[in-house]
Amino acid sequence: SRPRSLVARVCCHASTWRRVQDTGIPPRAKVTGIYVNSALAKTEANANGFDEAIMLNENGHVSEGSGENIFMIRHGQLITPGPADNVLEGITAKSVMQMAADDLGIPIVQREIDRTELYIADEVFMTGTAAHLTPIVEIDRRKASDLGLGAGTVARTVAALVGGSPVTTWESEDGDAVQVRLRLPASLRENPEQIGRLRLAVPGAAGKVRLIPLGEVLT
């Protein structure tokens, strides 16, 4: 019943292999040699019982996964490492940032992220051509703030946006008109009872994200 773009829930660890530096191989390019760096990190993660690796740069800041960009939700903001952290500037990542900002009104911040910040983030997820939008439920054997129950509200909502369609307007109790573009997968359209379990993230006062039942938006 989860959105098509939510393909998995993964457990990750911070790899001992560091992300390649721009002074060695340009990380923003899909260069064949870089895949060795990614393969080493991915193999290490699997050997240690994890699904995926989180690679740090030489300064010890979060860079990306072995083949995915990383996002976290904290203080109502969608935060991701910037190009200076040796990330591949992914197409899926750009789409997620644009939809989160334009459709949900969530502030986007590109900055350095410490490894331990991921432990206390409200949500953490990865994006990529193959990963689509993949929630991270455990990092370094620590459960994510979402209590390991799966995708958080923002991840679910953005995944629905990535998947597909119409625009609807929902009016809150305080009279605010909120326009929402929903792209619901067939699994939800065919099983409407599942919709009641989801919450939609919409912009609120002071840049905070409000959560409303998805069923109220669609009625």
Image (tube, rainbow, N blue to C red):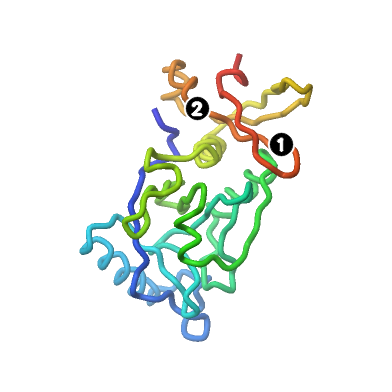
Amino acid residing under circle 2: Leu
Q: Amino acid at mark 1?
A: Gly
Up-down: is 182 above or below 151? Answer: above
- Dot 2 lies on which element? loop
Quadrant of the drawing holding the N terminus: top left
Which residue does the image show at 75% across and 43% down from the upper left? 206
> Residue drawn 34% across and 49% down?
10
Please name the residue shown 45% across and 33% down the image.
3
As displayed, is residue 80 above or below residue 27? above
Specify the label residue 198 is tagged with.
Answer: 2
Q: Residue at x 30, y 64 (%)?
A: 42
**Label 2 packing within 10 angstroms: few (<14), some (14-19), many (20+):** some
Q: Are marks 1 and 2 in contact (CB under 8 Å)?
A: no
Q: Residue furthest right?
A: 175
User: Which residue has dot 1 on it?
Assistant: 204
Viewer-side residue, 177 vs 211: 211
| Residue 79, image quadrant | bottom right
